[in-house]
Image (tube, grey):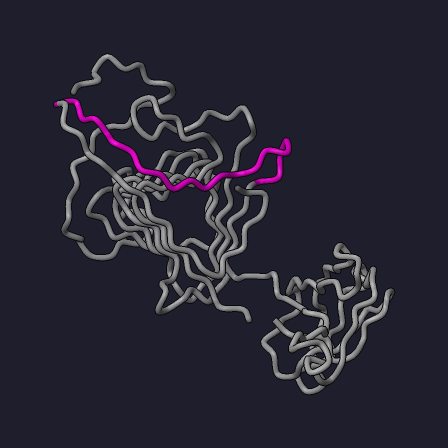
């Protein structure tokens, strides 16, 4: 997560965040709301990021729909420690698990336990464990 | 207790003989790795058999029907991989993409196919798991690159 270092206005196609981040063209970013309107967030795709200036330019299709406040320094001392600057988070991951987009019917992941009953009547119990980190999922539950 | 009288919905799972020893790494792309002598094609049912140590090294697979994982299935590092299947059933085996200590850093897509009326898979006897599914009753471990 990074923060806006300058305010970003509605209609903008670029905004400024911290320098020297690992950001790549095509990354999907979310700009969270900074107003009282909690749904005033934006979703953009990175076209370029300049690591020396911290300026992100986004795909022209993704102009900002809302104003997001930003500043060089956290105003935390005025707000009881809370950093009020707009948060910018990376939604992209290099590993994706996707459900094919058809009939509004998504994919599934289940982790379960089961008891398999063999033909000789013995029971084999199996217990599933799933370990995942930094994985993106779409159309899937 | 013996439930021999059950009626299967869809296919019933065969009993498997679990083997612990791993007979060396085999590559998915190598026809010799498969009992059929050929690399799985679209619509095929594929089993990673118990005792196998299979490495997925195909950049883009056809859409397989059911991939049963009863051995080890590891994704090869250093290449981008798109793995397509209607169902993936990790039963007695393990599916690994990267590890906690050493995450997978290339691009990997696992895409599940099917529609609402597609036939589902059966986890055991009459317990139906559903369709378009990654069903896990053993170990699935997927670790991607940290993005902060």
Residue A97: % across, % down: 51, 49
Q: Is residue A47 above or below residue B94?
A: below
Q: Is residue A99 left or right of residue B37?
A: right
Residue A24: % across, % down: 62, 71
On whether residue A113 falls in the magenta region, the answer is yes
Residue A76: % across, % down: 68, 80
Q: Residue at x 68, y 69 (%)?
A: A87
Figure label count? 0
Q: Quadrant of residue B2?
A: top left
**Residue B29 seen by the camera:** no
Q: Residue at x 59, y 43 (%)?
A: A139
Q: Quadrant of the N terminus of chain A?
A: bottom right
**Residue B22 seen by the camera:** yes
- Of residues B1 and B36, which is closer to you in this image? B1
Q: Is residue A125 left or right of residue B38?
A: left
Q: Is residue B107 left or right of residue A55?
A: left
- Of residues A122 and B35, which is closer to you in this image? A122
Q: Residue at x 72, y 69 (%)?
A: A47
Magenta-colored span: A100-120
Q: Residue furthest right?
A: A11
Q: Is residue B86 above or below residue B74?
A: above
On whether residue B100 falls in the magenta region, the answer is no
């Amino acid at each position: 997560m990074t923060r806006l270092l300058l305010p970003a206005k509605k209609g903008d196609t670029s905004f400024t965040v911290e320098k020297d981040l690992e950001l790549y063209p095509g990354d999907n970013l979310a700009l969270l709301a900074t107003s009282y309107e909690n749904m005033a967030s934006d979703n953009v795709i990175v076209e370029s990021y300049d690591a020396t200036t911290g300026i992100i330019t986004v795909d022209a299709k993704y102009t900002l729909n809302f104003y997001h406040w930003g500043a060089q320094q956290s105003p935390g001392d005025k707000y009881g420690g809370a950093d009020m600057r707009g948060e910018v988070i990376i939604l992209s991951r290099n590993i994706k698990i996707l459900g094919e987009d058809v009939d509004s019917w998504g994919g599934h992941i289940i982790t379960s336990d089961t008891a398999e009953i063999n033909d000789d009547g013995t029971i084999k119990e199996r217990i599933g464990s799933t370990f995942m980190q930094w994985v993106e999922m779409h159309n899937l539950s | 207790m013996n439930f021999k009288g059950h009626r299967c919905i869809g296919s019933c799972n065969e009993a498997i003989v679990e083997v612990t020893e791993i007979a060396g790494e085999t590559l998915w792309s190598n026809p010799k790795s498969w009992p059929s002598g050929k690399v799985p094609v679209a619509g095929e049912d594929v089993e990673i058999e118990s005792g196998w140590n299979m490495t997925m090294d195909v950049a883009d697979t056809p859409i397989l029907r059911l991939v049963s994982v009863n051995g080890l299935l590891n994704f090869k590092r250093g290449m981008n991989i798109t793995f397509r299947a209607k169902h993936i059933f990790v039963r007695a085996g393990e599916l690994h993409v990267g590890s906690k200590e050493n995450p997978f850093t290339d691009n990997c897509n696992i895409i599940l196919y099917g529609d609402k009326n597609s036939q589902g898979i059966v986890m055991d006897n009459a317990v139906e798991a559903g369709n378009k599914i990654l069903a896990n009753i053993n170990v699935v471990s997927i670790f991607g690159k940290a993005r902060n």
